Amino acid sequence: MKPKYYSERRTLLKFLKGKILDIGCNYGFFHKYVIGRGRKIGGEVYGLDVEVTNYRENIVKGDAHLLPFKDESFDSVFAGEIIEYLTNSEFLKEIERVLKKGVRCDYSTE
């Protein structure tokens, strides 16, 4: 992983709290980073990716346009470097649906 990746994630950890959804988690590097740092986020980290090849705890296969989670089930959502791959804006509605009211979504792209 690039140093920039970890620098961005370190900054994000200051804001991501509670039950977190990582959309486009790929191999779960973000999960490992959070757990490896022993960061107290006050909740669990869940991951979703369209091509899950390495199933780990709390990582599921799915589409960002149709998230397989209940309404208002997350305190924070992170989507790293995936927006350019999504075909329409439906994923924004899905993020809004799964986020608890009054909380945030963070995304990044290169």
Image: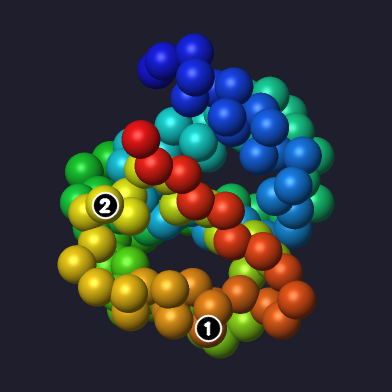
- Left or right: 74 with respect to 28? right
Instruction: Give whichever of 108, 39 is nearer the camera.
Output: 108
Residue 87 location, x and y as percent?
19, 67
Asked which secondary structure carries label 2, the reply is: helix
Residue located 66% across and 28% down the image? 10
Quadrant location of the N terminus in the rendered image: top left
Q: Which mark is residue 3?
A: none
- Identify which amino acid the numbered label 1 is placed on: Arg
Distance between the alpha carbons at the discs numbered 1 and 2: 21 Å
The residue most toward the top is 3
Foreground pick, 1 / 87: 87
**Local crowd size for mark 2, using a 10 Å CA cut-off: few (<14), some (14–19), many (≥20):** few
Residue at 44% x, 81% y: name it: 93
Tell me the residue at 41%/15% (across/down): 2
- In the rendered view, would you say 27 is above or below 84? above
Q: Is residue 76 left or right of residue 52?
A: right
Of circles 1 and 2, the one toward us is 2
User: Label 2 belongs to which residue?
Assistant: 84
- Identify the mark at residue 97; answer none if there is no mark: 1
Residue 62 visible in the picture: yes
